[in-house]
Image (tube, rainbow, N blue to C red):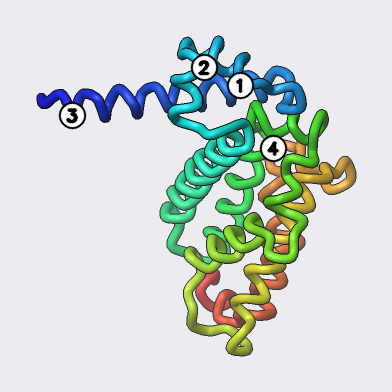
Amino acid sequence: MSPKVMSGKAASGTRERILDATRELAAGTGMRKLSMDEVARRAGVSRAGLYKHFAGRDALISALVEEELAAFFAGVQAVAQGYDDDADRLVHSFAAAYRSLSEHPAIRPVLTMNPELFLPYVITADSQALNWGRMFVATFLPLDGWSTPDAANRFAEHVARAFHTLILIPSEVLGLDRPDGPEEYARDFLLPVLEHLRPEVDSKSE
């Protein structure tokens, strides 16, 4: 193996150690008091080594969010691919997505202690979270059979907004914390909208 390849693997390993350390710190105390020095100590790297990979605290947090979102979408996509029926795909993909984020070890502490960190991703004129959510919903629902040309986009927006609200403002009324709560929510509140906007779902689900 060439020195260049070894160097690349070492750099990648260091970067992942830094992100792992940041994830652990976020799970314990949120990110309000997160410092680059603390991350460096937890990751076992020098301050200079930390800044070699991340220009600053904001860059580090952004990289962690992007990595977590990529893993999140990949996991839910794997669940979606396990179902041929559109209704089942929606119900189980939504449930997997909800559990993945609501049970994430770092999400709840951050929401509790410093929710403002989510604002750049959620509450903006061009919300990255909503954009990703819309695109994600569109990837596992066929493009044919919708009641109007823009119905698929409207449904994707509806699901993305409902999902973000449930994660950011947990509900004790909707029963999402029950064993089958996320599936029940999807069947009660999302599936009827899908069947209205995409009538072919009825015949495919029978």
Q: Nearer the viewer, residue 151 or 179?
A: 151
- Residue 21 appears at what percent x and percent y? 54, 19
Q: CA distance from mark 1 to mark 2?
A: 7 Å
Q: CA distance from mark 2 to mark 4?
A: 33 Å
Amino acid bearing label 2 = Arg
- Look at the numbered discs 1 and 2 and tell me whether their residues touch, using CB distance below 8 Å: yes
What residue is shown with label 1? 36
Residue 151 position by quadrant: bottom right
- Look at the numbered discs 2 and 4 and tell me whether their residues touch, using CB distance below 8 Å: no
- Residue located at (75% from left, 37% from top): 178
What residue is shown with label 2? 47
Does residue 125 sit above or below 28 in this rendering?
below
Quadrant occupied by the C terminus: bottom right
Q: Is residue 59 visible?
A: yes
Q: Secondary structure at mark 2?
A: helix
Residue 5 position by quadrant: top left
Instruction: Work out whether mark 4 precedes mark 3 in sequence or the reverse, and give the earlier one.
Output: 3
Q: Give neighbour class at mark 4: few <14, some 14-19, many 20+ (Cα, 10 Å).
A: some
Q: Nearer the viewer, residue 47 or 6?
A: 47
- Residue 106 appears at what percent x and percent y? 66, 29
Instruction: Work out whether mark 2 precedes mark 4 in sequence or the reverse, and give the earlier one.
Output: 2
Instruction: Work out whether mark 3 precedes mark 1 in sequence or the reverse, and give the earlier one.
Output: 3
- Look at the numbered discs 3 and 1 and tell me whether their residues touch, using CB distance below 8 Å: no
- Look at the numbered discs 3 and 2 and tell me whether their residues touch, using CB distance below 8 Å: no
Q: CA distance from mark 3 to mark 2?
A: 23 Å
Q: CA distance from mark 3 to mark 1?
A: 28 Å
User: Farthest residue toward the front?
Assistant: 48
Label of residue 4 in the image: 3
Q: Is residue 184 visible?
A: no
Which is more foreground, mark 4 or mark 3? Answer: 3
What residue is shown with label 4? 102
